[in-house]
Image: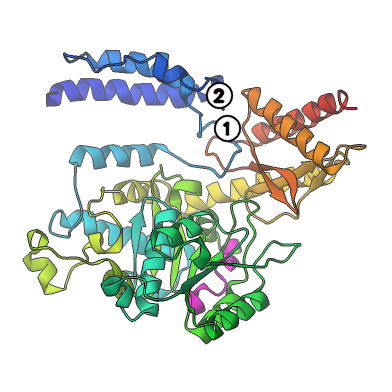
Amino acid sequence: MTPEEFRRHGKQVVDWIADYLAGIESHPVLSQVKPGEIRQALPASPPERGEPFESVLSDLGRVLLPGITHWQHPGFFAYFPSNSSGPAVLGDLLSSGLGVQGMLWVTSPACTELETVVVDWLAELIGLPERFRTDAAGGGVIQDSASSACLVALLAALHRASGGRVAAEGIDRRYTVYVTSQTHSSLEKAARIAGLGAAGVRVVDVDPRTLAMDPSHLRRLLAEDVAAGAVPAMVCATVGTTSTTAIDPVPAIGQACREHGVWLHVDAAYAGVAAICPELRWLNDGVAEYADSYATNPHKWLLTAFDCGVLWTGDRAPLVGALSILPEYLRNAATSSGSVVDYRDWQVPLGRRFRALKLWSVIRWYGAEGLREHIRKGVALAAELAEWVGADPGFELHEQHPLGLVCLRPLWPGLDAAAADRATLRLMELLNASGSMYLTHTKIADRVVLRLAVGAAATERRHVEQAWAQIRGEREALAATLP
């Protein structure tokens, strides 16, 4: 493809995306295709000769679009938001156009140095401590997601806990990681990958009301494990759990970690970016004093297209010590001088994309003011929805955390718990099949509840009103059919 052909087709692609976003409400939020339907509509073998790019765009609309679940749809209330925006898309396009492989400073100095600036900007915006800045002893790095951030933090924690022996000799004794039933599953996966196994993951009790970690139980587990000869390596405190946005008490957890010399990782994948709003800065309580590492995902709620998760550490030495391998073909004068950051040492893969471009584009386009406005809109809409749910006798509202998620349980008079849970799941299936909204579920106290996460960039008050009206109406209609 020549530069002129790229110019012509590139304009077609931008127009296609703009038309898609402008008309996104015309699509069902959740894809309605059956398993295998997309594959069957595509040729079994690749083309022998090249095809016009117009054919690619044609098949995108005809074959692939029906199989898309539309995460940017204003009726998307499932999981957590996966925000995208114009400046993020354009930043990604620039990254692809430059085609940078930024594994080392020398392979593109701008790729590395822009990233150090952007992660420091974000640390300042959300109020992280100075020691997390890249021009201090620690620093930040853009990962693909919080799952990778958890793994990298665990490897750094093991490096510190073992005095470097794990990197040199492998797992030679029992190391333990501490989570709760509400912690993201990526922590257990990280423990498996790191060689600790599921048996190395210790589950701390939660407060039955708030679902937050119980620091007193953590202390007991730490003491028991040390007495049994184990080495506690890392505790993960979550600020905004996936199920309910529960918030672990970081200050109390951090004090227990300090007493035992345990690495404290704070997983704020969803909620962390909300601290850009001064009134939500309390989300960082305890981070400055106790956290060894901290992660949040701009690709969830900060208008930055997936994938863009940021990990910070207060001391980069254990991180680099755990991950740095320098074969001859990567040696260069800049690396040998020790004066540059080589982000290959801050992540699992060697290669890395120029992800900083899209986060840089987003921060510059919206500014702190625009980003705060986006977060505040989601928080306000969720709070209003929670008021409506709390006032309706047909629903039970889970205690509301002041973020963008509302958890609610439809009430089914006359049904036992198991039958009521089946009815709730059936209600969710009906709502999602309608095409106008998409939500997911979780369990609280072993009962099924519906999760409605507000935060898509296109979601306005009318969309939340419509969703609530539909939920109420479908519940009434379903209740009339139940015994």
Residue 195 in view in this figure: yes
Residue 167, percent across and down? 29, 71
Residue 385, percent across and down? 73, 43
Q: Which residue is mark 2?
A: 25
Q: Secondary structure at mark 1?
A: loop
Q: Is residue 440 magenta?
A: no
Residue 381 located left or right of residue 263 = right
Q: Is residue 52 above or below residue 114?
A: above
Q: Main secondary structure of the magenta part?
A: helix
Residue 263 located left or right of residue 138 = right
Number of other residues with Cα within 10 Å of mark 2, as a class: few under 14, some 14 to 19, many 20 or more: some
Quick one: 375 or 220, which is closer to the camera? 220
Q: Is residue 470 above or below residue 452?
A: above
Residue 136, percent across and down? 31, 75
Q: Residue at x 65, y 59 (%)?
A: 246
Amino acid of disc 2: Glu
In three-dimensional space, the C-alpha distance between marks 2 and 1, rounded to whole angstroms, equals 7 Å
Quarter of the picture containing the N terminus is top left
Residue 471 lies in what quarter of the image?
A: top right
Residue 3 located left or right of residue 77 = left
Q: Which residue is mark 1?
A: 74
Residue 464 lies in what quarter of the image?
A: top right
Q: Residue at x 8, y 59 (%)?
A: 329
